[in-house]
């Protein structure tokens, strides 16, 4: 079983060995799209639809996906934003996937990676990211605050992800635009949707709330909405469907029925 620490070790080793490609920091990034605004303007639970090929817990999910086609399909299905896995080893993603998704739609795009260094922020920005993920379990409190400030300086919104009660205070202090609760335990990789319900009362009201992992039905989405979440990030279930965009639309319709 792959652990968070193994992924972080691989990330640090890659960053230490890589030289930035020529021109990686040159040129103007694409105009920012406002991820928090895209969620707020929905007036209902928003869906951040994810693009990824593999996961450490599942292996191959949709290894031959066409990023631009999938991004456009999600947009037609009513996604409020896109999340793109860019970690290259365990998830087989890339920053080029991020660029393709941004170019294929009008949706805000979240760069989802295991960010430990400001160089990753620059690379994400250069490839069109509108927002980045910071994982509380992957960072010290000092590193979390430093990267949060660095993201703000670059005009990048932050989705700050927590997994347990002890991570909430430092995450609140970082004042992210969005705070996510991942239902996946990063130690065991098991998913328990009760986690988002347990942590919901502890989350700051100043941030938009995002429920992540294990959400598969309209009833799950309605439960997240009832608990005070503004958005859900959904990947694997959608990627398992023959037509992810149609499945997304159906899921949104079912959530409205359960919420009525």
Image (tube, rainbow, N blue to C red):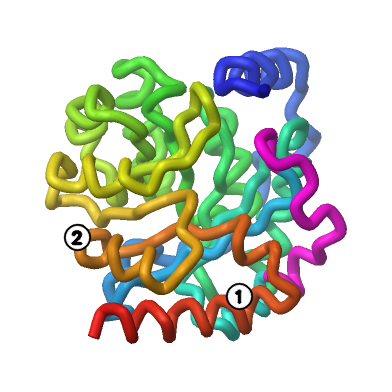
- State the residue at coordinates (53%, 37%): 121
Q: Is residue 29 visible?
A: no
- Identify the secondary structure beneath mark 1: helix
**Percent from the top left, x then y, of residue 149?**
32, 33
Query: Could you tell whether 173 is left or right of 3 in the image?
Result: left
Alpha-carbon span between mark 1 and mark 2: 24 Å
Q: Judge whether residue 228 is colored magenta.
A: no
- Identify the secondary structure beneath mark 2: loop
Q: Splitting the image into 4 quarters, where does residue 173 fall?
A: top left
Q: Residues within 10 Å of mark 2 (few under 14, many from 20)?
A: many
User: Quadrant location of the C terminus?
Assistant: bottom left
Mark identifier at residue 228: 2
Query: Could you tell whether 212 is left or right of 9 in the image?
Result: left
Mark identifier at residue 74: 1
Q: Judge whether residue 68 is colored magenta.
A: yes
User: Quadrant location of the N terminus?
Assistant: top right
**Percent from the top left, x then y, of residue 159?**
38, 46
**Percent from the top left, x then y, of residue 66?**
81, 66
Mark identifier at residue 124: none
Q: Splitting the image into 4 quarters, where does residue 67 fall?
A: bottom right
- State the residue at coordinates (48%, 45%): 132
Q: Splitting the image into 4 quarters, where does residue 174 fall?
A: top left
Query: Could you tell whether 93 is left or right of 204 in the image?
Result: right
Residue bounds of the magenta highlight? 55-70
- State the residue at coordinates (47%, 62%): 32
């Amino acid at each position: 079983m792959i652990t968070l620490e193994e992924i972080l070790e691989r990330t640090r080793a890659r960053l230490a060995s890589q030289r930035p490609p020529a021109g990686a920091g040159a040129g103007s990034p694409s105009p920012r799209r406002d991820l928090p605004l895209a969620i707020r303007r929905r007036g209902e639970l928003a869906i951040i639809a994810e693009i990824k090929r593999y996961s450490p817990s599942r292996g191959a999910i949709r290894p031959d996906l066409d990023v631009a086609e999938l991004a456009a399909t999600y947009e037609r299905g009513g996604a409020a934003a896109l999340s793109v896995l860019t970690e290259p080893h365990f998830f087989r993603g890339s920053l080029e996937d991020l660029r393709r998704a941004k170019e294929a739609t009008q949706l805000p795009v979240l760069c989802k990676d295991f960010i430990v260094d400001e160089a990753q922020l620059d690379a994400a920005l250069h490839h069109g990211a509108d927002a980045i993920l910071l994982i509380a379990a992957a960072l010290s409190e000092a590193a979390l605050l430093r990267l949060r400030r660095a993201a703000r300086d670059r005009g990048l919104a932050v989705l700050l992800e927590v997994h347990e009660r002890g991570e909430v205070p430092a995450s609140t202090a970082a004042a992210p635009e969005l705070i996510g609760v991942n239902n996946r335990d990063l130690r065991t990789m098991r998913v328990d949707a009760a986690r988002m319900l347990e942590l919901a009362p502890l989350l700051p009201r100043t941030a938009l709330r995002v429920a992540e992992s294990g959400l598969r039905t309209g009833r799950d989405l309605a439960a997240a909405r009832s608990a005070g979440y503004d958005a859900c990030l959904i990947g694997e279930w959608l990627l398992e469907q023959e037509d992810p965009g149609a499945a997304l639309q159906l899921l949104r319709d079912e959530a409205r029925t359960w919420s009525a």
